[in-house]
Amino acid sequence: MPDAAYPSKRSIALVGLMGAGKTSVGRRLARRLALPFADADAEIEAAAGLSIAEIFERFGEAHFRDGERRVIARLIEGPRQVIATGGGAFMNEETRSLILARCTTIWLDGDVETLAARVGRRGHRPLLKDREPHVLLAALAEARNPLYALAHFTVRGDTGTHGQTVDHILDVLGAA
């Protein structure tokens, strides 16, 4: 059974663009591995007492990224768990180094068309405010994909159901 075959003591961090399924897949993966799940964005909101959109609006992206770095460091120092990171978290060199050193990192890669369709259905993402999802995601993919590619493993997050993506992750982890 692949769920039991994954012996690592490390947390699993999911990285990738918005819409790749990090939160949805992460929840399912955590259940399959009988691990706690943490969504870094939700943890940031809880710590700040504000939504991510409010943090961006009041304090700017740099302030948000600093809080994100601190929250992810705290999550990594905690018990083994599945962590869904924010799409930009892996761009911060300090955060990326910490995640790569202390977690098993999975890049949920996805086609820009599919991701744009997913994020276009919800309006809560501050980077999308007054922007066309496809144009923004294409630019983000160009800038971020080379860094996401540093993850320990890459799994397509856009080629099936979230359950199938979890199966692919478990296959990759079981083969590691």
Image (tube, grey):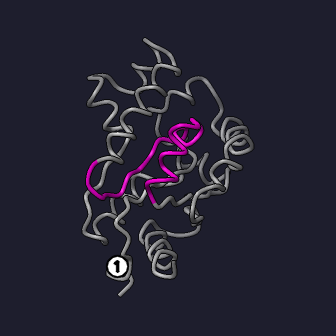
Tell me how many marks there are.
1
Left or right, 85 with reference to 94: left
Q: Is 103 situated left or right of 135 in this image?
A: left
Image location (x, y in percent) of residue 19: 53, 48
Which residue corresponds to mark 1? 3
Query: Vertically, is 82 above or below 176?
Result: above
Residue 168 x %, y %: 50, 75
Q: Which residue occupies the extreme front position in the image?
A: 101
The reply to whether the magenta stretch includes residue 161 is: no
* Residue name at image x 72 percent, y 38 percent: 139
Based on the picture, tell me whether residue 89 belongs to the magenta stretch.
yes
Q: Is residue 171 above or below residue 160?
A: below
**Location of residue 117 in the rendering, given as x and y in whole percent from the top left corner:** 58, 48
Query: In front: 52, or 113?
Result: 52
The image quadrant where one finds the N terminus is bottom left
* SS for dot 1: helix
Q: Please, which residue is most extreme toward the top here?
A: 58
Residue drawn at (49%, 28%), measured in percent from left and top? 65
Residue 159 quadrant: bottom right
The residue drawn where x is 51% and y is 82% is 175
In this orientation, which residue lies closer to the viewer: 95 or 155?
95
Q: Position of residue 40 (x, y in %)?
A: 37, 41
Label 1 Cα neighbours within 10 Å, binned few <14 / some 14-19 / many ≥20: some
Q: Which residues are magenta?
A: 78-103
